[in-house]
Image (cartoon, rainbow, N blue to C red):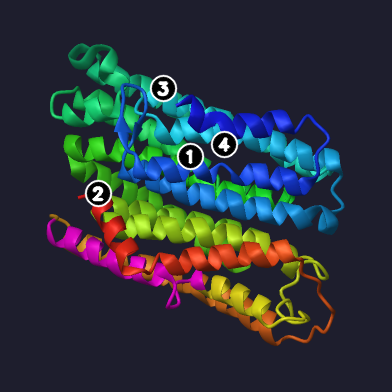
Amino acid sequence: MSIILLPSIFLFLLSYFKVNRILMAIVSSTVIIPSIYLFFHPFTGEYFLVDKLNSFILLISSIVSVGVSLSMIALPKRLNLTNYAVKRFYRFFGVFWFGLIISILANNMGLFWIGLEFATLSTVYMIKVKDSITAHKEAWKYLIVGAIAISLVLFGIILMYASAKDILGENAMNFYALTNHAKQINSFLFEIGFTIAVTGFFIKMGFFPMNLWLADIERASIYPVAALFSGILESAIILGFFRLSQIEMLVNNSHLITFSYIYAIFTLFMVSFLIYRAKDYVTTFALSGIEHMVLITIFWVSGGYFAALLHLAAHAFLKPSLFLSSALLEQNKKYNFKGTLQGYNSKIIPLMISFLLLGIISIPPSPMFFSEIFGFKAMLEAAKDSNFFFLMVFAIFFILLLLSVIFYKFINIYQEALYKEDRVRKKVYKSEVLMLLLFTISLALLLVPQVLHYIGDIIK
């Protein structure tokens, strides 16, 4: 396990020495090496495990980290970041990745919480890399909201531990032990703990009632920090929901569906109109991330595991790429959509950004187009097997109505970006082209039949 953590530890130590940002980016990208190794070498231990689910999430998170590292090569030129600010970012990125590995690979609720807390605290300092009053204010806001959310998660974990302590002893913290003995644990106590912990997870992802704090933070921080939130941190948080919901499905599946549907749909209702009123790129993309976490949640509890995981992977690549593309789009007219796809020397740049921008609203051939088809199919199957068929069908149509509001907003953004007059010359660096290529290729690979088959086999 210690070997897996070496890249993040080495990156943290290197940030204290005088090195250039290209070397820092190369070292940062080495986090993908242990992720690839673990992808092909699963294991199960008392405190840590590597199965198809978490190795898949770890691999896509490491690909995102490589894209973030590529963007950091050119970003100091765009934002006038000092060398100290760049090293400070990588220093806390090392801590962030250290915590993420512990959290994603944990086979223990307590270790999962510790890893998530590491990641939460490190992102507070990464937000403050941008030396502005707004960034410092939002960092404090994140610390407060994050503390509330992570405290709810901890309290929920304590209750779930207590629900199985008499049966499993110290193994009551173990995800797999809880899953194997779900029928024997105290269901009432477990469900209270599950509800509280999942509420904490949802708050950390920007769900109701705290929809705007995440968007404000991602707007105030530098673009790579927003990419880390959407592409990596949210994936780790939703993994915790996946693990606990697999236990709750065995305890009381109808309660799980009822709670998740009500919470998620109400959040989507709020977010859809916040997106409609958004005035800048990053805020729109940040709020859109909440929308996609809502869909992943609903698809998962409906039994659409393939749809949920395909959607998660597509979101993990699309959303960070759009945040990092904002550095290219906003370089001349910040907070303005008009004409932002014009003024580039090469046609490949606006083409790739257009593909990413339209892919996030599930226009084919985006992987999200296919994940939503299979996801809504799973919802219909769940409706047929439930005692509330008409309510479930109404929920599906209501979700589609809210998604149409978001679809309209993004199409309007795309039209303004493509057709409004703006002939200002825009510069793009080679590392940014490589970053866009990485995410575009990664998205395309999700549509390869072998990859789709693998995703379908993760949860059987």
Left or right of residue 116: residue 254: left
User: x, y (%) of residue 298?
Assistant: 33, 54
Label 1 – label 4 distance at C-alpha: 12 Å
Tell me the residue at 26%/23% (across/down): 189
Q: Which residue is mark 4?
A: 97
Q: Residues within 10 Å of mark 4 (few under 14, many from 20)?
A: many
Q: Which residue is mark 2?
A: 459
Asked whether, in this view, residue 315 is left or right of residue 121, the answer is left
| Label whose residue precedes the other's in the sequence (1 or 2) | 1
Does the magenta stretch mainly form a helix, a strand or a loop?
A: helix
Please tell me in which quadrant of the rendered image residue 244 appears: top left
The residues bearing labels 3 and 4 have C-alpha atoms spaced at a distance of: 18 Å
Q: Nearer the viewer, mark 1 or mark 2?
A: 1
Q: Residues within 10 Å of mark 2 (few under 14, many from 20)?
A: few
* Local SS, label 2: loop
Above or below, 325 relative to 58: below
Q: Which of pointers 1 and 4 indicates the residue nearer the eye?
A: 1
- Which of the labelled discs sits on residue 34, or is there none? 1
Label located before the other in sequence (1 or 3): 1
SS at circle 4? helix
Seen in the picture, residue 42 relative to 72 is either above or below; the reply is: above
Q: Amino acid at mark 1?
A: Pro
Residue located beneath label 3 in the image:
110
Q: Are marks 1 and 3 in contact (CB under 8 Å)?
A: no
- Left of 387 or right of it: where is 297? right
Give percent across and percent down for residue 150: 51, 29
| Residue 104 in picture, x, y percent from top left | 43, 36
Task: Using the rendered view, name the quadrant where residue 432 is placed.
Answer: bottom right
